Each structure stands twice: as C-alpha cells, then as structure tokens.
Image: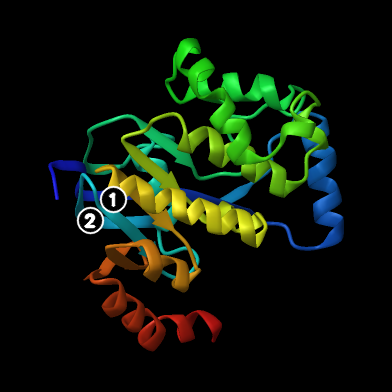
Amino acid sequence: MGKTTIDFKNVSKSYFIGRHKYRRLSETLSAVTSKLLGKKTAIAQTKFWALKNTSFAVKKGETLGIIGKNGSGKSTILKLISRITYPNKGEINVDGRVGAFIELGAGLHPDLSGRENIYLYGAILGMKSSEIDARFKEIVDFSEIHKFLDIPIKRYSTGMYSRLGFSVCAFCNPDILLVDEVLAVGDINFQSKCLVKMDSFSKSDKTVVFVSHDLKAIKKICSRVILLDHGKVVNDGKPSSAIADYLANYAQKSLE
C-alpha cells in the first residue's frame, strides 16, 4: 500500500431534522395556507449526529468498503470526502482528484443531452475540455448509451442515468473513486462491469471507497471493510470479519 489519500481525524457531523408540530388535517391545511401567504410555521428541530468522533485512514491502492444499516453514516462519509458537506468537528484530509458517484442525477442536467452532460459533469469533476475529448469514446462505450447520446437525459431511465453518471466518474481519471448505493439501479450486467472497473482501479494503485448493502459485492472487491453503527466505527478490518460482525450483531437489529 502507498501513501494515505483519505484521513479522517475525530470527525463529527450533525444535521437538524425538522418536523412540523401539527398532526391533524385541519392543522396541515392551515400550515399550507400560511406558507402560501408567506407566513412562518412552527417547526420542531432535533439534532441528529450522523458521525461521532470518527477516525480512519485509507491508503493509495486500497479498496475500502463501508457497511452498516440505514442511517449509520455511510453516505455522510462520502459527502464529506467529496466536500458536498463539511464536518462540525474534526479534520479531513484528501489527497488527489475525487470522482464521486454518490447521488443519482447529481452533476447532470435533465434538459441537456447525454453528450452535453458528459462535458458538464466532466467539468464539475475537474476535467479540462481536452481531457473529456480524449476520453469521450471510452465514456460512451462503457455507458452503452450510443443511440440516446443526443436526446435530453430527462427521457432516460434511472438505469441509463446510472450508466452515464458512473461512466463519467470512472473515466475522469480520478485518484479516488467514491461509489454509493446508487449503482444498484443499473442492470446486473452493467453492475458486474462496474465492479470489474472498480477492481481495476485498486490494481492501478488508486483508491476506491464503496458503500453498499450488497455484501457479496463488498466481499468480492474490497480489501478492507469498515462497519458503522450510529455514526461510529465498530469494526475495521478484513471483509470477512466486518461482514460476519454486521450479520451477527447489527443486520437483525435493523429488521426488528
């Protein structure tokens, strides 16, 4: 393994979860009317800690899997690495260009064509126009959207959105590739192709961080797995160990 590319030091991240205090239909209708008239309505806010004093490091050439039940902080970690959001406490150091495929449709404009979105999303990910030109054919070939390249992507299926988004991220030449559960919307053949591509990244001495509930995929391509519970790292080690811990002690709880 090479140098450290991602370093979390005692990172905490909280969100305020808002909930309107009214519960009856009449109260709801009254609140909607007030909103239309520009009046403020009372909202009860609760602070939710997505991460609590979380520390870990990822090295160059490592493929890190992150697992845990819903709400454990998995996606928050990816958003922090890609600087979509920032921590309340702690320090995060990221060394290298990040390609983040963590939210379906993010970086894509529905009124633009597939061709135009390749250039738009590529620019958002830090690519120069000349770099996109050089990788354009690879992106289109991998995404398999040739016939639909010049139509607005608002006409695309969710699977086609997924194909286009992942392909741009994978071929923007990132040092760090972040992939969230959104990959699950693609068909099985495309998912398999994506896993092979992700595996090739680590073999090219690049870093991959993969969040998924697909434990077979996690075990197949990850060299190390972090298990999160309520925003804390409860297991950090070999995939077989972290997955066994999750199945034995946490997966059942999420079903209860």
Asked if residue 5 is positioned above or below residue 241 in the image, the reply reads above
Residue 239, how many percent across, how many down?
30, 72
Task: Give the colouring mode of the picture.
Answer: rainbow
Give the residue displayed 22% in from the left and 33% down from the top.
Answer: 95
Q: Nearer the viewer, residue 185 or 148?
A: 148
Residue 189, how many percent across, how many down?
63, 58
Q: What residue sits right under mark 1 in the picture?
A: 12
Q: Amino acid at mark 1?
A: Ser
In the image, which disc is placed on residue 171?
A: none
User: What element does badge 2 sit on?
Assistant: strand
Residue 236, how many percent across, how many down?
23, 68
Q: Is residue 48 left or right of residue 110?
A: left
Q: Amino acid at mark 2?
A: Asn
User: What element does badge 1 sit on?
Assistant: strand
Q: Quadrant of the C terminus?
A: bottom right
Asked if residue 42 is positioned above or below residue 220 in the image, the reply reads above
Q: What residue sits right under mark 2 in the picture?
A: 53
Q: Nearer the viewer, residue 99 or 253?
A: 99
Residue 136 in sight: yes
Give the residue displayed 50% in from the left and 66% down from the top.
Answer: 70
Residue 161, how many percent across, how many down?
68, 41
The answer to which quarter of the image holds residue 191 is bottom right
Give the residue displayed 63% in from the left and 45% down from the top.
Answer: 162
Residue 48 in sight: no
The answer to which quarter of the image holds residue 167 is top right
Give the residue displayed 73% in from the left and 32% down from the top.
Answer: 146
Q: Is residue 100 left or right of residue 77?
A: right
Q: Nearer the viewer, residue 45 or 203?
A: 203
- Please tell me how crowded label 1 is: few (under 14), some (14-19), or many (20+) other residues with Cα within 10 Å: many
Tally of numbered tags = 2
- The answer to whether mark 1 and mark 2 are in CB contact below 8 A is yes
